[in-house]
Image (cartoon, rainbow, N blue to C red):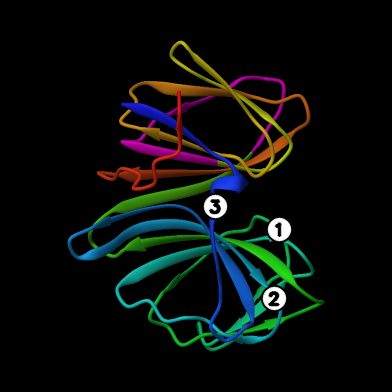
Amino acid sequence: MSIELIMPTQWQTQRWQNGGGITHQLCRQDDEHGLLWRLSIAEVASDGPFSRFDNIDRIILLLTGGGFCLHGVGANPQLLDAPLKPFSFAGETAIHCTLLDGAVRDFNLMTRRGAVQAQLQVLTIGSAVQTLLLSPQTLLYVASGSINAVSGAKHITLQAQHTLNLIDETGNVQLSSNDNAQVIIIGISDAQCGNSTGKF
């Protein structure tokens, strides 16, 4: 059992080979067959194709910027112009992304199909305490504002762009905020984080 705090200074950043953007890897887990799951944030600077990820399920959310449109996910293009609205698609889908009004930043969850189960929700946290039941692995990404998190005897303050990673913790986590923080909450079954960051 452990709790990890992942801050932007700990992100692993790579530029895309096509020069169209940057990916910040927040946290991931692999096994002998490769990627199990990954959390990342992409900075997309220009139109272009998405990378192909066979046997990977993806969820994407707009964080900042004017939005973008995904071509190839169905009969009609998928418009993502509202922040923090999840959209799911298969990683092997041939997708072309066009920006609506300049560069954007988006949040990505990737999971290997059939290997792990993941649930994602977006909550607005206010002064009233919200209690969340923990999964075998629970991750919280603070999209805006700041959060007070309590898990057992541990009290953690999270600022915007911080990620809290709770591994095999039991019971629940209690969240509250003085500024109506927006939080992306992910529950993963039978997975642990492969990144070793600051532990409490």
Q: Nearer the viewer, mark 2 or mark 3?
A: 3
Q: Identify the residue under disc 2.
A: 68
The amino acid marked with disc number 1 is: Pro
Q: Quadrant of the C terminus?
A: top left
Nearer to me, 48 or 115:
48
Looking at the rendering, the stretch of residues picked out in magenta corresponds to 124-140
Spatial separation of the CA atoms under disc 2 and disc 3: 24 Å
Q: Quadrant of the N terminus?
A: top left
Nearer to me, 28 or 71:
28
Give whichever of discs 1 and 3 has the lower sequence position: 3
Residue at the extreme top:
153
Position of residue 19 measured from the top left corner of the image (x, y, whole percent): 62, 83
Per the image, label 3 sits on a secondary structure element best described as loop
The amino acid marked with disc number 3 is: Trp
Q: Residue at x 31, y 43 (%)?
A: 192
Position of residue 104 measured from the top left corner of the image (x, y, whole percent): 72, 69
Q: Identify the residue under disc 3.
A: 11
Per the image, label 2 sits on a secondary structure element best described as strand
Q: Residue at x 52, y 81 (%)?
A: 50
Task: Look at the image and say whether residue 128 sits in the magenta stretch.
Answer: yes
User: In the rendered view, would you say 175 is above or below 11?
Assistant: above
Q: Identify the residue under disc 1.
A: 83
Give whichever of discs 1 and 2 has the lower sequence position: 2
Give whichever of discs 2 and 3 has the lower sequence position: 3
Query: Relative to 105, is 27 on the left or the right?
Result: left
User: In the rendered view, would you say 52 is above or below 183?
Assistant: below
Task: Look at the image and say whether residue 134 sits in the magenta stretch.
Answer: yes
Residue at the extreme left:
32
Position of residue 76 measured from the top left corner of the image (x, y, whole percent): 59, 86
